[in-house]
Image (spheres, rainbow, N blue to C red):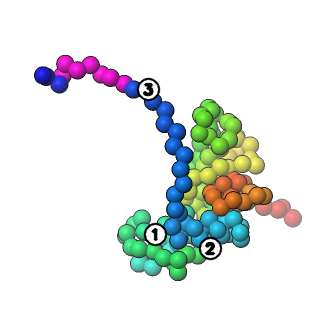
Amino acid sequence: MDDSNWPIFEVDQHIVAHGRYYAGKIGSRFFTALRDEKKILGIRCPHCGVVLWPPRATCRDCFSQLGLEDMEEIGPQGILESFTIVTYKEPIQPRTPPFIVGIVRLNGASCGMTHFIDEVAHDEVKIGMRVTAVFAEHRQGHIMDISHFKPVRFSTD
């Protein structure tokens, strides 16, 4: 039978997957520092010098293996590299729109990570603005222990 005779068939399917995973030694140290010390840790590759956040066991640039001894504190301030204002609702979103999601590159890090930007009017958020981490009051050992990032406001005194 000729494959070109088959009609297009689509399946409308929605998968919800609940699960747990082991974060590993490096991930566990990262999340424990967030929860217990309000510290953000990155990991410096001893071979190429890149500092990654969140930390991971393999360098994204040179694929070297990284260890606990390579972890160091970074941030909590950084630069907003990019952002978007989310105006639509999806069931997986942890917030009700509208809200801002941005890529934050922390001081000392070589790359950015996506997180919420808050405490700023949507028409005032700008690429390149300085931001700082705001930690959740009740931390549980996951990325939302950083509640959001807010603009760094400089005093005019």
Q: Main secondary structure of the magenta part?
A: loop
Residue 12: give its label. Answer: 3
The answer to whether residue 125 is visible is yes
Q: Residue 63, how many percent across, how many down?
A: 37, 69
Locate the N terminus and report the quarter of the image it occupies. top left
Q: Nearer the viewer, mark 1 or mark 3?
A: 3
**Residue 156, disc:** none
Q: In which quadrant of the rendered view does residue 73 lie?
A: bottom right
| Residue 132 in picture, x, y percent from top left | 70, 60
Mark drawn on residue 57:
1
Give the residue drawn at x 54%, y 46%.
18
Kindly indicate whether the residue at mark 3 contacts the one at mark 1 (C-beta within 8 angstroms): no
Amino acid type at circle 1 is Ala
- Tell me where residue 22 appears, x and y as whole percent: 52, 62
From what the image shows, is residue 128 above or below residue 53?
above
Circle nearer the viewer, 2 or 3: 3
Task: Tell whether position 7 is magenta.
Answer: yes
Identity, as a three-letter code, of the amino acid under mark 3: Asp
2 and 3 marks in contact (CB < 8 Å): no
At x 53%, y 63%, the residue is 23
Please tell me which residue is depicted at 62% across the width and 52% down the height of the picture.
115
What mark, if any, has residue 73 been given in the picture? 2
Q: How dense is the environment of label 1, judged by Cα within 10 Å: few (below 14), some, or many (20 and up)?
A: some
Q: Residue at x 67, y 36 (%)?
A: 97
Distance from disc 1 to disc 2, alpha carbons, whole Å, reads: 16 Å
Disc with the residue nearer the chain's start (1 vs 2): 1
Is label 3 in a helix, a strand or a loop?
A: loop
Q: Which residues are magenta?
A: 4-10
